[in-house]
Amino acid sequence: MTDKTRVRFAPSPTGALHIGGAHTALFNWLWARRNGGSFVLRIEDTDLVRSTGEYEQTILQGMRWLGLDWDEGPDVGGGHGPYRQSERIGIYLEHANRLLDSGQAYREGEAIIFQVPPGRTLAFDDVVYGHIEMASETLKNIVLIKSDGFPTYNYAVVIDDHTMEITHVVRGEDHISNTPKQILLYEALGWDVPVFAHLPMILGKDKKKLSKRDGATSVYEFRDMGYHPDGLFNYFALLGWNPGDDREIFTREEAVGMFDLARVTKKAAVFDTDKLNFVNQAHIARISPVERAKLTLPFWNEAGLKPCDRSDEWLAQALELLEGRGQTFRELAEYTDYLLSFDSVKARYDASDLDEANRGLLRRFFAALLEIPSWDADAMEALAKTWCEDNGAKLKDVAMPLRWTLTGRKVSPGIFHVAVFLGREETKQRLCHYGLA
RNA sequence: GGUCCCAUCGUCUAGUGGUCCAGGACACAGCCCUUUCAAGGCUGCGACACGGGUUCAAACCCCGUUGGGACCGCCA
């Protein structure tokens, strides 16, 4: 016997780790860590046709990426195994036979079916949804063991949660209707019922269940789009829960310290990419420049920008130039492409917007700029301002063309800071390429 | 169809009978800053689904309506 909190996440390996599953896993993890309890990972692979070992691995990797570590599971073992339902067939059969012997279940062909007793009120007090009850006559008899010898979900989940000594069953709201059936089985087996906490569903923009139409649905897709696991974690935590004050940006550890199942909300939540982007941006901002560069590496590589030619320090500084611009690592890579490669500039800009009058003015200004004694942003800006004043021009008349020739874009960080980062020689070469120096 | 669940700004939410002509965040708009875009600051827009009760008093309690959703599989 133990009074230690034990929770579990029990995915079936029939696909990647999707948003709903990740959300459920995260809340279980939070509750386990908050209480110093154990987080158990159980694989519900009794659907022979759809389950694969490959998907199981994908789910495990997705959880690791999100930072959800488990204490017991198919890969790490533990004192309550095995952790794959397909390896627990004997246990299911043993208890099904007990039910057969006591006359509470009957055989139908190869299957074993539980006889639902009439006149019973099945009630439980959900941590999130409160008191819920259902009359037993609204239930059909429950198949325990299928003709193929494998247990059904509603039966296996009861056997497993009890034998694994799960104290809190934290799962999606779509299981509320299954709970009365499971309570019936707990009682028939003579077992205590665990605490139930159902979590609100996560919906797509159309307020329907998330589907392919809603874009990314597996956590891997978020990784590949450039989200930081801490950002996704933070956003998921905010879906159906809040700390009770105005804090919205927090680390995993901070969330553990604040989490409480009693503060979980009941209403289904719509997944909002805008808010996720905001939260992710905040997490990108709080990590160190070196870490930021490390996480941006794959996206620079993907864009063919050869970050390996640069030092870690150089890459970190390139990113620091962005000063908060960019909501994903993918955007960080995109917004710094001109720093790593002049080719990306040439592909975007051909200087065809400049007429001879413009070029004349710009050549005179850039000549002065390239001669500046100290290659420093403040000095450049000061020089540019006085030069423009003396020549009847506006600062943007020279700043924008400089921006275009250096970055190939109409928006960028402060252009003199870009020039400083690029260096006097590179700046000169880019200006020369466009015939402006 | 049966059973169950849900219902505050476009979205995430605070709110558990008076302190709420409803607070925060994202998004959106405007202003400031400014060489552009962000970031930051300020301002604005914007909700208690509807109808009945209960009460001196209701976003909060009760009933109904409407609208969503889930489950009702030898899927999980």
Image: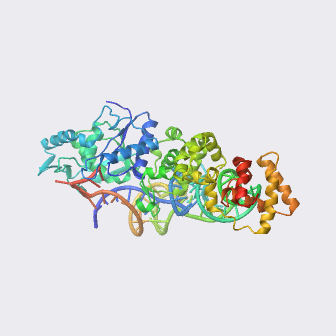
Say which of A326 and A45 sits in front: A326
Residue A344: x %, y % from top left: 61, 57
Q: Is residue A95 visible?
A: yes
Report the residue that reaches farthest toward the right.
Answer: A390
Say which of A104 and A133 sits in front: A104
Side of A354 where A288 appears, left or right: left
Q: In this view, does B37 lie above or below A31?
A: below
Say which of A47 and A396 sits in front: A396
> Can you tell which quarter of the image residue A347 is in?
bottom right
Q: Is residue A188 above or below residue A267?
A: above
Q: In this view, does B34 lie above or below A95?
A: below
Residue A265: x %, y % from top left: 46, 51
Side of A117 where B26 appears, left or right: right
Say which of B44 and A321 sits in front: A321
Residue for point 40% across, 59% down:
A209
Q: Is residue A414 visible?
A: no
Image quarter where the C terminus of chain A lies is bottom right
Q: In this view, does A37 lie above or below A113?
A: above
> Can you tell which quarter of the image residue A313 is in?
top right
